[in-house]
Amino acid sequence: MIIEEQIRKIAQLATAEGRYGQMFNHKEVGFLDYPSFNKSVIVDADARVVVGFDLEGIRITADAKTKRLIVHNWPQPVELAYEVDMRYFDLDQGLFNSFDSKELNEIKARMGEELRAEIDFETLNQKSFEQAANLLAIIDDNLRLSGWSLEVEKRPEIELSETPVYK
């Protein structure tokens, strides 16, 4: 029972992290392409995505007769975090046309979406399954030292046909 309580305190198990970066050139042409009305900015975008398992729904039971610890409802991997850091370079604003905070936020949102499209979720998914399987194997090995075994319903396996959909 102590193990179950400890696992519940750890609501998420991060098993894979990916970092992606891209440079974007945003330019807006103003009135008749006159320099005083044009504006442009170069954006350096770095994204960090963390994939893992939300352990909120799992349930653990212990069968003392057979000395088995049984994990029920093992989840599929999900995106646990997506963070984008952007730096603006070469901000060139026209005399009559400048960037306001709303426009910069819209550029940031659009660049974040474009960068998200480049993320290799299939590889992150595979790494998540591998890490979870390794962790469960370590737990199983440690339990076996004391005569117990670990049984996981729907043990994490690499199943590319069931690749989860991310946010």
Image (spheres, rainbow, N blue to C red):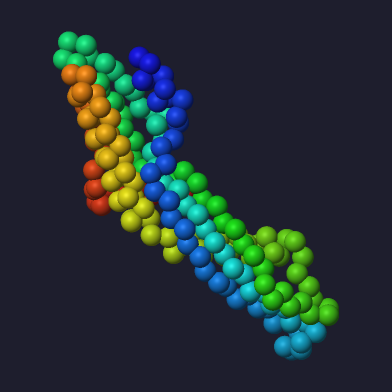
Using the image as rendered, state which of residue 89 and residue 103 is in the foreground: 89
Looking at the picture, how far across and down is residue 34, in whole percent? 76, 89
Quadrant for residue 153, please give it. Answer: top left
From what the image shows, is residue 65 above or below residue 93?
above
Quadrant for residue 86, please give it. Answer: bottom right
Q: The N terminus lies in which quarter of the figure?
A: top left
Q: Residue at x 75, y 69 (%)?
A: 99
Judged from this view, the residue extending furthest toward the right is 95
Looking at the picture, how far across and down is residue 70, in whole percent? 25, 23
Q: Residue at x 31, y 40 (%)?
A: 132
Judged from this view, the residue extending furthest toward the top is 65
- Image-based side of 29 in relation to 64, left or right: right
Q: Residue at x 30, y 51 (%)?
A: 126
- Image-based side of 5 in relation to 73, left or right: right
From what the image shows, is residue 20 above or below residue 15?
below
Q: Is residue 106 visible?
A: yes
Looking at the picture, how far across and down is residue 77, in whole percent? 36, 43
| Image label count | 0
Using the image as rendered, state which of residue 85 and residue 164 is in the foreground: 85
From what the image shows, is residue 147 above or below residue 57?
above
From what the image shows, is residue 5 above or below residue 74?
above
Q: Is residue 68 visible?
A: no
- Image-based side of 146 in relation to 126, left or right: left
Using the image as rendered, state which of residue 136 and residue 76 is in the foreground: 136
Looking at the picture, how far across and down is residue 51, in whole percent? 41, 47
Judged from this view, the residue extending furthest toward the left is 66
